[in-house]
Amino acid sequence: MSRKEYSYEIVEAINNFLNEDDWHFSFDEERGLFRFNLSLKGKIQKVNYVIDVKDDSFIVYAISPLGANHDDPENLTAMAEFVCRANYGLRNGNFELDMRDGEVRYKCFVDCDGIIPDSAVIRNSIYMPAAMFDRYGEGIVSVIFGMATAEDAVRKCEEV
């Protein structure tokens, strides 16, 4: 397996932020990936984070432990509609749904072309997915368990 190319400067900036902010994390040097978990207060009580460092950017993924039922086409369709409705108008990142296995995640992309991100940029990229799961988590759960339509679930999440 060949070693992945990524920016050591971006890795150092993220590593410094995570250490200064007292996160418990691991870093995969072969793949350029940070991994850690974050506890939330909403219906989705924990998300798993992966930060994928590239040469001139990094991507923060917050992955829900709950996902749509990939064996139920109606459930997958409802979750896909939820994701589309929730994403409309979002300015910093977006929800994603893996139609193969039902995984739901939130993604923030940070372009670092020509710069090294400061702690404020890194903080925002990490805390934004958590804020979105806090805001939309109840709706995600409602759709997964068939308690609401995608439209109603998003409407309720956005009323708050």
Image (spheres, grey):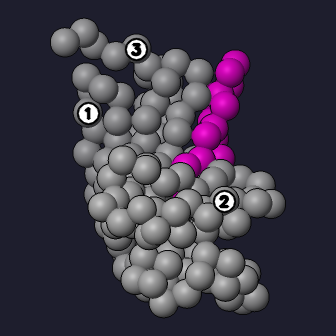
Magenta segment: 106-121
Q: CA distance from mark 2 to mark 1?
A: 32 Å
Q: Quadrant of the N terminus?
A: top left
Residue labelled with disc 1: 28
Specify the quadrant of the image occupied by residue 118. top right
- Please rate how many residues cluster around mark 3, counting C-alpha atoms within 10 Å: few if below 14, some from 14 to 19, many from 20: few
Where residue 159 appears, as percent x and y from the top left, is: 75, 88
Where residue 71 appears, as percent x and y from the top left, is: 30, 61
Where residue 106 appears, as percent x and y from the top left, is: 53, 56
* Mark 1, secondary structure of its residue: strand
Residue labelled with disc 2: 84
Numbered disc in front, either 2 or 1: 2
Task: Please name the amino acid that badge 3 sits on.
Answer: Glu
Where residue 127 appears, as percent x and y from the top left, is: 56, 62
Nearest the camera: 109 or 120? 109
Q: CA distance from mark 3 to mark 2?
A: 33 Å
Residue 65 against residue 17 in the figure, above or below:
below
Numbered disc in front, either 3 or 2: 2
Q: CA distance from mark 1 to mark 3?
A: 12 Å
